[in-house]
Image: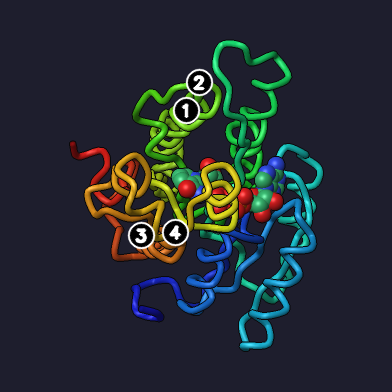
Amino acid sequence: MSGRLAGLAGRTAVVTGGAQGIGAAVVERLCAEGCRVVILDKDPAHGRTLVDGLRQQGHTVRLAVGDVTDAAAVRTAFAGVPAHWSPPTLLVNLAAGFVFKGLEATAADWRAVLDPTIVGLSLVTRSFVAGLPERDADAAIVNMASISAHIAQEGYLTYNSSKAAVLGLTRCLAQELAPRGVRVNSVSPGTVWNANNERYHREALGLDRAAAEAAPEHGGKFLLGRFADPAEVAAPIAFLLSAEASFITGTDLAVDGGYLAV
Ligand SMILES: NC(=O)c1ccc[n+]([C@@H]2O[C@H](COP(=O)([O-])OP(=O)(O)OC[C@H]3O[C@@H](n4cnc5c(N)ncnc54)[C@H](O)[C@@H]3O)[C@@H](O)[C@H]2O)c1
């Protein structure tokens, strides 16, 4: 599926955490839809590999290496958008802190998860909004939540609280930015089969994808009986950014193979 969602072609999009994993699939999908894309990511190696590959395919994509928690780096990333590109009017906030702890979490642990997921998200969004056209921006933002935002999971106090905060932040931003013509939504994926999850299942559990999906406590806990591919999360994100979702704001879309339904 590519190039068929209304209102995306010719737009400029910013994707944080776009160097790999789900973010890379979002970048690829938006390129296929005819967007110019800025990747804001702190990982230069993965970012450069992705950008080089996409440019070879004829796409227009730029890497801004920086940490979303660094206000100056965020401003530099937006200032670096080439003048002949349209100003960014699409934003996907995927960069996040991955800290999985319970009440034993220290203040430093909490900052390590909340700084990227919440503080960084708001810094990026502020720079994005500052650069929007004053009127009729027709802009859209998608934030990354998770099924973990909706449930309790043992030992996940830090991560789940941070993702639950993304839901609240999304609703508040939708209210604050509606007068500027900006829609703000989030997505809540279940487990996505990326390099990190592949490594975790292999090293910690001794399972390949087929074995993990056959296990009731892993892939089997999703109604569809499997994990998601990154492209299956990128597609609903592209939809929420597009004009097809023009009356959708302030909500969360579960992309979870039915996990939250039961
Ligand atoms: N993988 C899953 O199963 C899953 C499920 C639900 C939600 N999510 C969410 O999706 C998003 C992407 O997850 P993923 O699994 O693709 O991760 P990933 O580790 O494959 O990619 C994350 C990217 O974000 C970048 N990043 C992290 N912190 C950053 C920071 N402070 N500044 C700039 N860049 C930063 C990393 O360099 C990396 O390129 C996260 O928000 C995650 O919580 C993932």
Numbered mark located on residue 43 in the image? none
Q: Earlier in the sequence, mark 1 or mark 4?
A: 1
Residue at left 49%, top 79%?
32
> Marks 1 and 3: which is nearer the front?
1
Closer to the chain start, of discs 4 and 2, is 2
Question: Label 1 vs label 3: CA separation?
Answer: 22 Å
Residue 45's image quarter? bottom right
User: Amino acid under label 1?
Assistant: Asn
| Lower position in the chain sequence, tag 1 or tag 3 | 1
Amino acid type, residue under disc 4 in the picture:
Arg
Of the residues under marks 4 and 3, which one precedes in the sequence? 4
Label 1, label 4: how far apart the Cα atoms are? 24 Å
How far separated are the C-alphas under marks 2 and 3?
27 Å
Provide the residue designation for mark 1.
160
Q: Position of residue 248 (x, y in %)?
A: 29, 50
Instruction: Compute the Cα span from label 4 to label 3.
Output: 23 Å
Task: Identify the colour scheme used.
Answer: rainbow
Placement of 130 over or under 11, stated as above or below: above
**SS at mark 1?**
helix
Residue highlighted by disc 3: 236
- Residue depicted at 59% across the width and 52% down the height: 199
Residue 165 on image: x %, y %:
47, 27
Instruction: Name the side, left or right, on which 11 lies relative to 248.
Output: right
Q: Nearer the viewer, mark 4 or mark 2?
A: 4
Tally the marks.
4
* Residue located farthest toward the left when viewing the structure as drawn: 262
Please state, as top left, top right, bottom left or bottom right, where the C terminus lies in the image.
Answer: top left
